[in-house]
Amino acid sequence: MFGPSPNIFMSAMSSFQVEINSGQILLASAEKIDCASKCEYRCGKASRHKMCIRACNTCCDRCNCVPPGTSGNRNVCPCYANMTTHGGRLKCP
């Protein structure tokens, strides 16, 4: 067997975020953001505040990203923007 095991490589990579920029692969430390405060702001004007907070926190936990502002700007967080419910509707507020 040659080289390190793939499992060792993957576990070492789990603490990094990979970005592809102009054909280059950049590795950056992926620090966990404060989902509670980001989602509180994001859902601040929502008519169904508790439901918005619950969905936002789920999306934030999975994607480690919340778009800026109280609505829109979904293009900033592609993972967050593309997550859907079982019914095919957008999950994240």
Image (cartoon, rainbow, N blue to C red):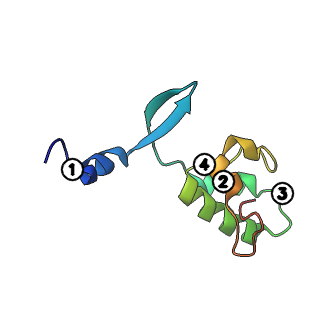
Q: Which residue is mark 4?
A: 65
> Residue 20 location, x and y as percent?
54, 33
Q: Does the CB distance between marks 1 and 4 fall below 8 Å?
A: no
Residue at x 67%, y 60% (from the top left corner): 83
Tag 2: residue type?
Tyr
Tag 3: residue type?
Lys
Q: Which residue is mark 2?
A: 80
Residue at x 28%, y 46% (from the top left corner): 9
Identify the element where label 3 is drawn.
loop
Residue at x 70%, y 65% (from the top left corner): 84
- What is the CA distance from the residue labelled 1 to the residue labelled 2? 32 Å
Q: Earlier in the sequence, mark 1 or mark 4?
A: 1
Q: Which residue is mark 1?
A: 5
Report which quarter residue 91 is drawn in: bottom right
> Residue 71 location, x and y as percent?
81, 50
- Toward the left, the furthest residue is 1
Q: Which residue is mark 3?
A: 45
- At label 2, counting other C-alpha atoms closer than 10 Å, the crowd grade (few under 14, some 14-19, many 20 or more) is many
Left or right, 80 with reference to 5: right
Tag 4: residue type?
Cys
Identify the element where label 1 is drawn.
loop
> Residue 89 location, x and y as percent?
78, 67
- Disc number lying in front (3 or 4): 4
- At label 1, counting other C-alpha atoms closer than 10 Å, the crowd grade (few under 14, some 14-19, many 20 or more) is few
